[in-house]
Image: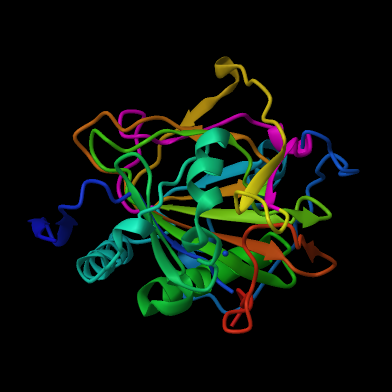
Amino acid sequence: MGTKTSGAVQESNCPALAFITCWDKDHVERRGVSPAEPRWHCCAGGGIWGASALMASVTQQQIQKFHKDGFLVLEQFFSAEECDSMRSQIQRIVAEMEVPPHCRTAFSTRQEEQVQEQGSSDYFLTSGDKIRFFFEKGVLDEKALHAYDPVFKQITHSPKVQELGRKLGLERPVVVQSMYIFKQPRIGGEVTPHQDASFLHTEPLGRILGFWIALEDATQENGCLWFIPGSHTNGVTRRMVRAPSGASTCVEFVGSEPAYDDKQFIPLPISKGGLILIHGEVVHKSELNSSESSRHVFTFHVMEAKGTTWSKENWLQPTPELPFPSLYT
């Protein structure tokens, strides 16, 4: 696989690469699940902070806005150098990747496509403790980076991320999953409206938090995120669960995604180095990348482990080799 140089960062010539997943040791009926309640509480949050000037900009007012909306944009949370280091590292990983043709699984948020692609693939179901590659209609994503790669591990557990967790009131956060999403020019696929808790379910609800890091400018043209403000308070209506033994697929869906009004969504363009916090139940999506620019992202999810049960029905499960590690080091 060849590469081409673009500034200080090499770009992959693999147009079909969608994302790389790094699962960390990563309702038709409600099944008795009550509507989500915000589980992170505002706190003073101290601790050692190597970039205190950045953290000083995260105010209690912003944290309250996160609880109200279900998402929060923090511009310039990471430096350009940190973003470039992740992009350079992923190109080294991609250059060495070997994905047998029968394991080239597509990734999608559409229910029928998910069951068809991921649901019939052990490569997907056993990706929890490995770095693996997934293709989605001209994109690829890789899982398990935060656990095995030193560059992504350092970012995931950086002092500023840990301090942000403390400011949000997280007491025992663990990292459950991570992905590098490429969103390639002209072919980067859409991500349909969904809630992360549909795939990463906990009891009680409200314990999953996503960290979405823009490694390049994310615009409406190249597929920035769109959110429905306040939608994290309405519970979860669809879940992807492991199928019973002997079923024709590995996973199946319980429940269904409601029809959302496009007028409810608002776009969240963000500059390179920006961070978007995503509540596990907030409804969000992204459109096709029809531009000439890629939209690289590194994202990971944490769970507040205190008083929380990780669903044994989740397709993603910790393993003896890779249990869910603490965010705090």
The C terminus sits in image quarter: bottom right
Q: Give the quadrant of residue 232.
A: top right
Q: Is residue 61 visible?
A: no
* 78 vs 174, nearest the viewer: 174
The x, y position of residue 259, in whole percent, is 64, 20
In which quarter of the view is residue 4 placed?
Answer: bottom left
Within the magenta stretch, is there residue 226? yes
Quadrant for the N terminus, please: bottom left
Query: What residue sits 36% from the left and 75% below the top?
Result: 151
Q: Kindly report the secondary structure that dominates the magenta region of the rendered protein.
A: loop
Residue 173 vs residue 161, the one in the foreground: 173
Left or right: residue 221 versus residue 192 is left
Residue 225 picture location, percent across and down: 46, 36
In the image, residue 74 lies in the stretch drawn in magenta: no
Residue 28 shows up from this direction:
yes
Residue 93 picture location, percent across and down:
27, 69
- Highlighted magenta segment, given as a residue range: 214-243
Residue at 15% over, 52% down:
13
